[in-house]
Image: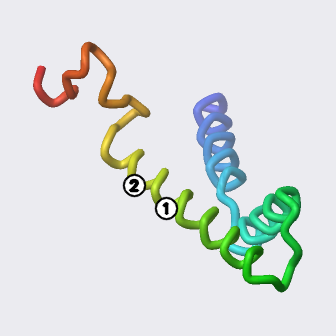
Amino acid sequence: MRIGSFLAISMTALLIGACASTGEQRAADEIRCRGYGFRKGTDAFSKCLLDVDLNRDADRRASLNYPYGWGPGLYGGRPWRNW
């Protein structure tokens, strides 16, 4: 019973730790855009932040279309639903 409790607590801690708050994501995005050479407060910096956010949303939508990370080219291009 102790092992089951330990595993449940460990999995919960991992799931909570994997989530990033909105502020943490924003800070990481700003660091990324500054790394690209954009200066904070400029239009180019704002566009970089927007592009990073849009790319994150596109990745999230794409992961919903293909469960378990499978892509359209897997198994000869046949989607998994047609098996």
Pick the front one: 63 or 33: 33
Give how far across and how far down residue 29 sits, in percent.
75, 64
Q: For numbered disc 2, what is the local secondary structure?
A: helix
Q: Are marks 1 and 2 in contact (CB under 8 Å)?
A: yes
User: Along the horizontal axis of the image, is 61 left or right of 47?
Assistant: left
Quarter of the image with the C terminus is top left
Figure label count = 2
In the picture, the quarter occupied by the N terminus is: top right
- Which residue position holds label 1? 57
**Residue type for callout 1:** Asp
SS of the residue at dot 1? helix
Query: Residue 77, how many percent across, how many down?
Result: 24, 21
Answer with left or right where residue 58 lies relative to residue 66.
Answer: right
Q: Amino acid at mark 2?
A: Arg
Q: Position of residue 82 (x, y in %)?
A: 11, 26
Q: Within 10 angstroms of label 1, few (less than 14), some, or many (20 or more) residues?
A: few
Residue 11 marker: none
Q: Is residue 63 above or below residue 58?
A: above
Above-or-below relation of 68 to 19? above
Q: Residue at x 28, y 14 (%)?
A: 75
Give the quarter of the image for residue 44. bottom right
The image quarter containing residue 8 is: top right
Residue at the spot x=72%, y=65% of the render? 25
CA neighbours of label 2 inside 10 A, class few (<14), some (14 to 19), many (20+): few
Q: Position of residue 43 (x, y in %)?
A: 73, 82
Q: Answer left or right for 14 relative to 40.
A: left
Display colour scheme? rainbow
Q: Quadrant of residue 4?
A: top right
Question: Label 2, on which residue?
Answer: 61
